[in-house]
Image (spheres, rainbow, N blue to C red):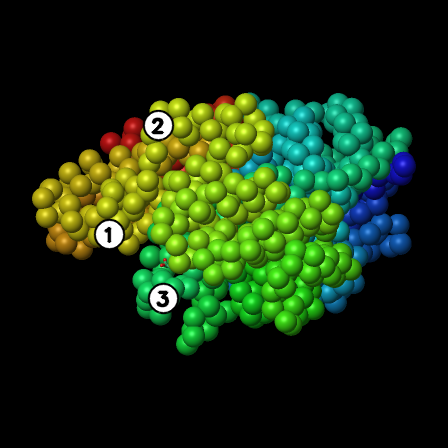
Amino acid sequence: MTREYILLDGAMGTQIQNKGLPLGVRPEIFGCEHPEIIQEIHEDYIRSGSQVIYANTFGLNRHKCKNLDYSLDELLTINIQSAKKAAGNKAKVALDIGPIGELMEPYGTLSFEDAYDIFKEIILIGKRENVDLVVFETMSDLYEVKAGVLACKENTDLPVWVTMSFEANGRTFTGTKVECMANVLDGLNVDAMGINCSLGPDEILPLVQTMKQWTNKPLIVKPNAGLPDPSNGQYSMDAQSFVSKMKCFKELGVQYMGGCCGTTPDFISCCNQDKEINEVTKETKNGVCSSSQMCELNQVRVIGERINPTGKKRFQKALLEHDMNYIMEQAIAQSDAGADILDVNVGLPGIDEAQMMIDVIKAIQSVVTTPIQIDSSNPKAIEAGLRICNGKAIVNSVNETNMDEILPIVKKYGASVIGLTLNENGLPTTSEQRFSIAKKIVGRCKELGIKENDIAIDCLTLTISAQQDQAKETLDALAKVKKELGVHCVLGVSNISFGLPSRNHIISSFLTQAMYCGLDLAIINPNIPEIMDAVYAFKAISGQDKDCQNYISIYANEKMEVTNIQENMTIEAAVLKGLSEECKNLTKELLKSLDPMDVINQQLIPALDKVGDLYEQNKLFLPQLINAANAACAGFDVIKNEIPSSDSISKGKILIATVKGDIHDIGKNIVRVVLENYGYQVIDLGKDVPIQTIVDTAIEQNINLIGLSALMTTTVESMKKTIDALHQSGHPCKIMVGGAVLTKDYALEMGADYYAKDAKQSADIAKEVLG
Ligand code: THG
């Protein structure tokens, strides 16, 4: 089938600059003072063929509207009105929402529900002003996006689109993966999703191809006009070459196309021809995920069962005492041991299960990126868990009696689900009866729009020491469900061996038989090598482990590391895993035998360096980098508190600021955390900082290293002016710069001494300059 794609608009920022945006003035505020200019730009785009225009509201939220001459409501309303006037009935108007500009918990301070409220406020104003749709663009954190999408869906009927900005490695700068974005947003049922900014069409193409494998939703592409020219910051492509590149997206069936930084009405008008695309829908990939780790459900997966108080005094104690550290260790140990998914069960008499579910999932998400399984039959706890989860979870479990209550929640949050073959009479004894319950649950799921590949059926394991004949019924039912219903199959495998000696033999053997019958999801204890051996061996034999690569990499050296956190924890491990409590305790321990400076230089700093190396190799991502920095910080704090003259451990002062006109400080804040944890004293002047303030502070405080940040194309000019002013002042200092639109060549061309690609590099530069 063919259809026409819909043409969106191009960049707003550069157009406003061309029409006289003064240096240091924010586009949204300029839009209030000169609504006619904004209207004109929209009209230019509509004349060029734009069928949907994005209102000039990208940078707005309540946190960015403090101390201004206009209220958030006025800024939104006036800018939306300019778009509506330009559009008339010729185009649709999108309320354009950008990132809040603060890091979400646990890496930053913004909570999920705060993010939700901030978005809700914007969206309600947009709704009142009759926008046609809501679009989140240039987003980086999938968790923040989830808050925004829920805020939109729970408060309006407006269509909602999401585009995120990726780096060439397929991740956003906070670590969100393309696959995870598509998987989560498909589940949340957004109206369209895609990619904007960050890269040119060439670099975006492979990312869109990946995205397409995970969703049949309409796709959006708004690339930059190529990459910025290092010498002057101008984008590399002209309208004609842009259009020729956009042809690839037409072939992929992308339904909404436009441009981002560096594109103009010319680009759009060149795209406004031969708009036919192929419409293809196909079976998509599927899985459960966090925002940064995907577990595709296409082979046997291990679900770690240890986060569960049943029969475990130690775990019950941890829950009752709210000892999140213990639970975090359980999460880390299981993930390290090979768990693909972590089951989370926090049901215990006397605790508020919904609140505990939130606290435990937050704690787990702060130390591992492993996807989550929510193990509860309490609808409030399930919903609380699904909300707070930063990816796509699987709900364990529904059965025939509670499915009408729980499945709609599963559908709303776009989760996967486990259905148990239980009804009001309990667990039937024959495989046929179990199969028939499975069929009813699968049927109900499908009525609600939950897809086959989001469903797993559990035919339930009983213990052979009491009901020996039931093992066969379980396996027969499993094989039949697999064959006839085409859904995934799951079992809590450990149950098989209750009451017997040497349980692991029975568990491994039953597990192998179940996998042969079609088991895909094994709920087991991954910390027991013998059981994991059975999983890896099965994958090698069945061909799921292609060319036995994984098997060989695990067993080639016969080196099975059994993780035992309590016994083997080093400062390096504590920092790497982001465990602040551990790092604090280990530092205290070490101070008994080592000099404080030695603890810093031989332990904490090398640990941070190791984290930095892994980050640079793309083996760790920003959230882990920040977590590690915070853990190291807990160690530094111990040293500072116990050693009175610890000020002398500061390795030098660094001044940092986001330049005048730019209110994005997320990158700068990350840099501050990392630099502080490397032992530098950081003077942070904040965002939107006047040139003179930076110069004066540098002189007064005798600063030798200054870090400047600018995120937007419109504020790079302001960065250059700041650098010039610092040079003119004659104060001897080195300047490092960073920000999304910069490149190394461009930074040096502007007169900076260093370009810091990321927070890790800023620490390297500090080391070079200050020692
Ligand atoms: N199906 C589904 N979900 C499930 C199960 C299932 N969730 C719970 C359970 N069964 C699987 N999870 C666990 C969790 C912990 C333990 C066993 C299974 C466990 N057992 C110890 C034992 O086996 O002796 C008891 C406590 C101890 O001594 O450590 O820990 O079937 N969908």
**Residue tagged 3:** 316
Q: Badge 2 local density, few (<14 within 10 Å), some, or many (20+)? A: few
The kind of residue on which mark 2 rests is: Glu
Which residue does the numbered mark 1 point to in the structure image?
584
Number of callouts: 3
Residue 321 percent coordinates (x, y): 33, 68
Residue to which mark 2 is pinned: 558
Label 1 beta carbon within 8 A of ligand 1: no
**Quadrant occupied by the N terminus:** top right
Q: Tell me residue 395's x, y (percent).
A: 58, 58
N-terminal-most mark, 1 or 3? 3
Rounded to the nearest angstrom, the CA distance separating label 1 from label 3 is 25 Å
State the residue in front, 162 or 321. Answer: 321
Q: Is residue 719 left or right of residue 246?
A: left
Residue closest to the far bottom: 350
Above or below: residue 333 compared with residue 158: above
Q: What percent of the width, then of the height, locates residue 460? A: 57, 57
Query: Along the line of sight, which residue is nearer the eye, 30 or 241?
Result: 241
> Which amino acid lies under the numbered mark 1 shown in the image of this protein?
Lys
